[in-house]
Amino acid sequence: MLRSSAYSLTFLYFSSVAVSPVIVGINKKYMEDYIMRKEYTVEQMAETRWFYTFSEPNAKGEKLVIEILRGRNDGGSRALPVLWYKSGMTDRVLETYWCISTYVTDTEGRCWIMYNPQSKRSDDGKRAVINFDWMYEATEENKEKLIDEAFRLFSAATATGTLSNGFKLGISVFYLS
């Protein structure tokens, strides 16, 4: 029987694309402008499901929780990885894959679905669709890539409510009491 477990990890996240070790030695004020601490707790809810709860808010005062599920191809002709491959969305049939959901709580206690790299607007802009550029085989390395990208998007949020690429995302799902 699987037991729920929680643990805490701390990482430093560099918001700039390339940071050399030489820059790390500069001054604290300079580095605070470019580093947001990536501290989170992990709670394993099932054998294939985890919640990553980040402790620090972003510049807008929002808090982030990422739910990660490991999907598995059941081998059927209508399995999602088979359909994705047949429709040209993936270059091969994935045996396993990561599926993430992001939950962002604003300063008023409202929860939104935002900052998810696996979600993007459709070509006509009328709905959200899967961003297959971020649909990966379920490996630890790929899980970290997804967590890092969701955290990067979350960290890059500005007070205007717009992502760094100018794309507004947000679907209200529920209120927290």
Image: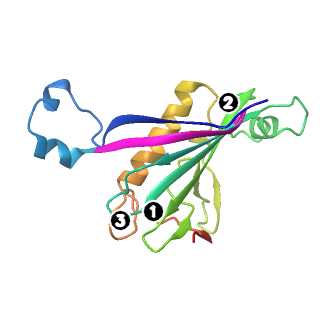
**Left or right, residue 35 beside residue 116:** left
Residue 96, label in figure: none
Q: Position of residue 101 (x, y in %)?
A: 61, 51
Question: Residue beneath label 3, please?
Answer: 60
Question: Residue beneath label 2, please?
Answer: 91
- Secondary structure, mark 3, is loop
* Residue lying at 42% horizontally and 51% vertically, measured from the top left: 153
| Mark sitting earlier along the chain (2/3) | 3
Kindly indicate the quadrant of the structure image that contains residue 49.
Answer: top right
Instruction: Please give the range of residues in magenta.
Output: 36-48
Dot 1 amino acid type: Phe
Is there a contact, CB below 8 Å, between mark 2 and mark 3? no
Q: Is residue 95 placed above or below 40 in the rendered structure?
A: above
* Residue lying at 42% horizontally and 53% vertically, measured from the top left: 154
Q: Residues within 10 Å of mark 2 (few under 14, many from 20)?
A: few
Gap between marks 1 and 2 measured at Cα:
27 Å
For the N terminus, give its image quadrant: top right
Dot 2 amino acid type: Asp
Q: Is residue 140 placed above or below 133 in the rendered structure?
A: above
Dot 3 amino acid type: Lys
Q: Is residue 63 placed above or below 137 in the rendered structure?
A: below
| Mark sitting earlier along the chain (1/2) | 2
Residue 167, label in figure: 1
Gap between marks 1 and 3 measured at Cα:
16 Å
For the C terminus, give its image quadrant: bottom right
Front position among marks 2 and 3: 3
- Secondary structure, mark 2, is loop
* Residue lying at 38% horizontally and 35% vertically, measured from the top left: 10
Q: Position of residue 91 (x, y in %)?
A: 67, 30
